[in-house]
Amino acid sequence: MTHSPSKHGLICLATLTTVLCWNGSTVDSTNKNKRQDTNFYGTILDYATPNPANVEDIAIADKDTFAVYQTVKDIKTACEKSSDKNIKTDMDPKQNKSLLDLHEISMIESRNQEHPTASEIEINNRKYIEIDVTFINGNKQTYLVESTREVSCLKVDKSADNNSTPILEKRKLNMIHVKNLTIKGYKSAKDTSKNHDDNQVSKKAEIAGATEKIIDQLEENVKNLPKDNSSQYDKIRSTMLSLLRSLREQLQKMLNMLKN
């Protein structure tokens, strides 16, 4: 039986050309979402989960500073005595505000740890929730903040393998859902992003190196395809098929990096 090695060689060379044009490059997924300049990290506990989660990139209304309002004793007393859930008053909490900085805060927690709505007060058709803020100097103060004020962060899910890249889950929840938010510290987001970039570059280099090695072996086998020796041809053909399977695995890794 006569084989046609030139046909198989052309197919392999076409595959090689495609891969060589790729050159192991992938889209940099780290630019999909721009991170804040300062990465505040700590833990968050909501009313739906039993255990706090490790989080990074903590922000309130997408900022590291946020407005809170002073509690008004007369309004609070009126809320406790009134059967009407919505208190009408000229004492608008927004007329007496403070601007807090996450750099100065160690903990934010709901006033009522068992029932979130128990800490909620509706004033002039706007819902507020009472929060206790603990500062890094140990002082503690109670404030009002809108129940719908958004808290955002990245939940960090680390695997048992310390060398693997942790999975980051974007979380957004209203303040009324937050039972406890602890800020353990902060660091430059650029340093965090740099570490992530370094991991991506390392993975790309590893995949590119393995792919290049497979390409070299395929090219060598194509050059050495026998024209007359049928048994030798079958042996090299088997080797090439095995190399193509390995090449397919490397390409799949590249596609997976594109998706992330």
Image: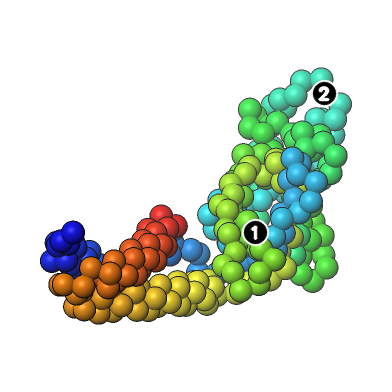
Q: How many marks?
A: 2
Q: Position of residue 256 (x, y in %)?
A: 42, 58
Which residue type carries mark 1? Asp
Which residue is under mark 1? 157
Q: Quadrant of the C terminus?
A: bottom left
- Label 2 residue SS: loop
Left or right relative to 61: residue 183: right
For marks 1 and 2 on the same chain, the one whose residue lies earlier in the sequence: 2
Name the residue rendered at 65%, 59% in the picture: 157
Residue 17 lies in quadrant: bottom left
Q: Residue at x 61, y 74 (%)?
A: 163
x and y percentages locating residue 244 in the rendered image: 33, 64
Residue 155 visible from this viewpoint: yes
State the residue in front, 141 or 103: 103
Looking at the figure, which quarter contains the N terminus?
Answer: bottom left
- Three-letter amino acid code at the position of disc 2: Ser
In this picture, is 80 found above or below 12? above
Way the structure is coloured: rainbow
**Residue at x-position 62% and y-position 39%:** 148
Q: In the structure shown, which secondary structural element does the residue marked by tag 1 occupy?
A: strand
Of circles 1 and 2, the one toward us is: 1
Q: Is residue 93 visible?
A: no
How far apart in space, not on screen, are marks 1 and 2 (Cα)?
45 Å
Residue 168 position (above or below residue 118) = below
- Label 1 neighbour load within 10 Å: few <14, some 14-19, many 20+: some
The residue where tag 2 is placed is 82
Please identify the quarter of the rendering in which residue 176 is found: top right
